[in-house]
Image: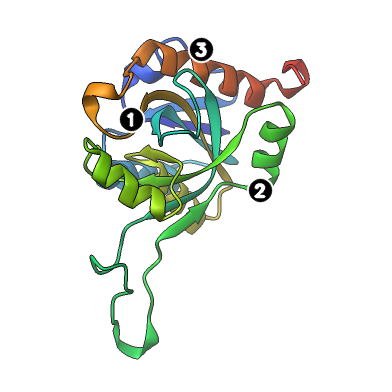
């Protein structure tokens, strides 16, 4: 069984789940996403999790309307200076989660570019914050990616994050925000995932 997760229903309003797939609307933000996906995985037998939705691209990475696969997701879980938290007994925070490499490779083969993501609880609205996050290696920004991938990782279920680019991260006045274009990119990427043999090479 395939579990397809989106933050809000409108992101997948166009989508008719194929046989053997379920859609979960998890809510906005990493806490809602982690809690609801963990609950679903605890109560159902799923073979794959797909986090499908829109995301912002950092300048110069992907245009609005592009579909992407997020190979690696990170979460800021450290000191503001970037130093790791000093935890007892050498314990470390987990601040990275990955999409299943074979699923990423399949989508890349279908022409869907692979990018690095960062999960935020506050949408970036200034160029200064965008530059700081980009310096960490972020190429796209979402609010649920890390949470979904990490919940699936803990449950031992392969997962992949697929996004359509709806805006450019930074000053909101220049963000080029376009929900419909983001959904168009998501549709192309999801089609490549569900029917890779039909995707243009």
Q: What's the CA distance linking mark 3 and mark 2? A: 26 Å
Q: Residues within 10 Å of mark 1 (few under 14, many from 20)?
A: many
Q: Residue at x 72, y 18 (%)?
A: 199
Q: What's the CA distance linking mark 1 and mark 3? A: 17 Å
Q: Which of the 4 quarters of the picture holds residue 182?
A: top left
75 lies left or right of 104: left
Q: Earlier in the sequence, mark 3 or mark 2?
A: 3
Q: Is residue 142 above or below residue 24?
A: below
Q: Is residue 67 above or below residue 32?
A: above
Q: Residue at x 24, y 31 (%)?
A: 171
Residue bearing the label numbered 3 = 16
Residue 190 on image: x %, y %: 57, 22
174 lies left or right of 60: left
Name the foreground residue: 169 vs 164: 169
Residue bearing the label numbered 1 = 7
Residue 44 on image: x %, y %: 47, 41
- Label for residue 101? 2
Residue 141 in view, yes or no: yes
- Label for residue 114? none
Q: Which of the 4 quarters of the picture holds residue 173?
A: top left
Residue 5 on image: x %, y %: 43, 32
Residue 147 in view, yes or no: no
Q: Residue at x 36, y 28 (%)?
A: 168
Look at discs 2 and 1 and give the one toward the viewer: 2
Q: Earlier in the sequence, mark 1 or mark 3?
A: 1
């Amino acid at each position: 069984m395939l579990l397809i997760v989106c933050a809000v229903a409108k992101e997948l309003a166009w989508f008719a789940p194929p046989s053997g797939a379920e859609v979960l609307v998890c809510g906005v933000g990493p806490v809602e996403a982690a809690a609801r996906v963990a609950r679903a995985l605890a109560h159902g037998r799923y073979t794959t999790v797909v986090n499908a939705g829109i995301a912002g691209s950092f300048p110069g990475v992907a245009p609005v309307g592009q579909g992407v696969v997020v190979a690696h997701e990170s979460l800021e879980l450290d000191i503001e200076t970037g130093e790791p938290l000093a935890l007892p007994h050498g314990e470390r925070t987990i601040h990275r989660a990955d999409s299943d490499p074979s699923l990423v490779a399949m989508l890349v083969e279908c022409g869907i570019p692979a990018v690095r993501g960062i999960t935020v609880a506050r949408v970036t609205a200034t160029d200064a914050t965008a530059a700081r996050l980009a310096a960490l290696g972020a190429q796209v920004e979402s609010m649920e990616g890390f949470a979904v991938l990490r919940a699936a990782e803990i449950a031992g279920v392969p997962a992949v994050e697929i996004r359509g680019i709806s805006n450019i991260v930074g000053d909101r006045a220049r963000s080029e925000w376009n929900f419909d274009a983001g959904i168009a990119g998501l549709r192309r990427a999801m089609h490549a995932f569900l029917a890779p043999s039909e995707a243009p090479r």
